[in-house]
Amino acid sequence: MTIISIKDVGKGLNSDLTAEELGPGYWSDASNVRFTNGYAERFGGMASVFTAPSVTPYFLIPYQLATVGYWVHAGLSAVYVDDGTTRTDITGTAPTGGIDDKWTGGVIGGVLVLNNGVDKPMFWNGDTGTNLATLTGWGATWKAVSVRPFKNFLIALGITKGSSVYPHMVKWSHTAVAGTIPTSWDEADPALDAGEQDIAETPDLLVDCLQLGDVNIVYKERSMYSMSYVGAPYIFRFQRLPGDVGMLARGCAVATPMGHVVLSSGDIVLQAGQGASSIANGFVKDYVFNNLNSSAYKRAFVTSNPPKNEVWVCFPYGSATTCNRAVVWNWVDKTWAVRTLTNVTYGAFGQFTPASALGTWAGDTGTWDSDSTTWNADEYSKAQSKLLLCQSTPSIVMVDSGNTDNGSLMTATLERKAMHFDSPNVVKLLRAVFPRVDSTPPATLSIQVGSSMYADEEPTWQTAQNFIVGSQTKVDFFATGRYFSLRINNADYPGWRLRTLDIDYVEQGAF
């Protein structure tokens, strides 16, 4: 008898390499299981945090004032703000963009700015008695692909002036006074800091920008530039960063303590100001780009789940036209996971203050026997940023809230194929699996073992056996082969965490 003990089951998903190449603790397939602190852990659920939106939301951003915190969501033709109790229509003149005319914007000096690339940029001062208004000082016939705040400036990329298109132009406003928006974009006035410059060294088009420390990183389709404040007379200095990597679409980058994580054309990269390096190659790169719907790629986006140290790269998988998958990178543990999504259109993170029913006994939908949430835990604590996602249902949900996805069961699966226990040429008899699981008894995991004689042969799966937490220490099997596969599945309500895994087998000879 031989017992192989896998102490670190949380090395993460690796779907790019062939299964027989993977070391212990890596998984060849996984769904709705994250990997952190050496453990494999079922993702939390998602729960609605606002009443159903009046429009399908395609953009979401937190907006914090001194006395109230808003979440702003934008549809194709309307924009609303919600404080968790009251929703207000602040649309004003109705926007005219389509689904792929993705919103950009941000908060500068306490003022919200929004832009969809089709209409003139808009701003809102936080007063629910007023509507969005056209950006002050913006030309009557101008449009921009993206508008973002940086320091005391607004930065606009990809400018159209009437019938003239300047796809390489970066245009910046005059400096703004705190509590106001910039008063002018007149680059010809020497008394102002406003200006514009073409970044035409590379032929690819401007996409978006995102602040990194004290510089602004401007992303084109296949290149990147740093934009540094230097003061008068030039105001900004532009420098090309190493590499031929850019951004796939607007909203496809997020800032982390490690730098920017960027979904590019063909890779997912980490960019810390000195050029980009792949974090997906050899792990999930093939999974993403072999399955990304090429006709809906502009609907992909990248966001962050700070309490879990995670970046979520959300994309339309297969023939989906909204995001139905997220590959999730933990920037502390350097692990990858996959989270299934339902009709997600956008996501953002920030502080969230719920309506009174949420987070109370009255607002808890789980049953006493199956609810795995922690007694007196505050999922809605204002001390942490929360990740919220828009769905086309329409709805807005918070991740890691509750045990279900808006009341629907969520199946969590771990799978590892072609395990050979360092003896690929030896036939073995697998007799038992010993999972050590943290969960609320009697949570049930379905465990299945498969066997094959060759690494690339589809395994013959044994009948799945139930493992009941708190009642069992092992699951018995009788499987013979050179290679073994293991599948752990759970569609029950309670969350669970796999700590370690032992496998009992006997070598039978080289034949």
Image: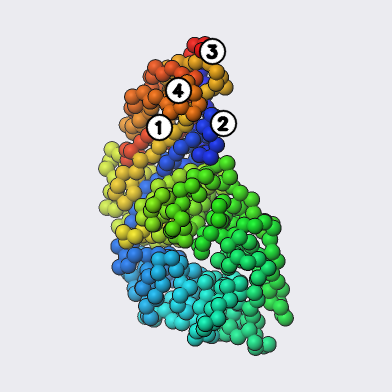
> Pointer 2: what residue?
21
Q: Nearer the viewer, mark 3 or mark 1?
A: 3
Q: Say which residue label 1 marks.
A: 488
Q: Tell me the mark number nearer the camera, choosing from 4 and 2.
A: 4
Q: Distance of mark 2 from mark 3, alpha carbons?
A: 20 Å
Q: Nearer the viewer, residue 2 or 442?
A: 2
Instruction: Evaluate if marks 3 and 1 touch, with contact meaning CB atoms under 8 Å apart.
Output: no
Residue that carries the numbered disc 3 in the rendered image: 510
- Residue at left 71%, top 73%? 230
Quote the CA–CA distance across marks 1 and 2. Answer: 20 Å
Type of amino acid at the residue the image marks with label 3: Ala
* Amino acid found under the numbered disc labelled 4: Ser
Looking at the rendered structure, the secondary structure element under dot 1 is strand
Q: Are marks 2 and 3 in contact (CB under 8 Å)?
A: no
> Helix, strand, or loop for circle 2?
helix
Which structural element holds mark 4?
Answer: strand
Pointer 3 local density, CA inside 10 Å: few below 14, some 14–19, many at least 20: few
Residues at marks 4 and 3, CA–CA distance in whole angstroms: 14 Å
Residue 116 sits above or below residue 348 on the image: below
Say which residue appears at 36% left-offset and 31% top-offset. 445
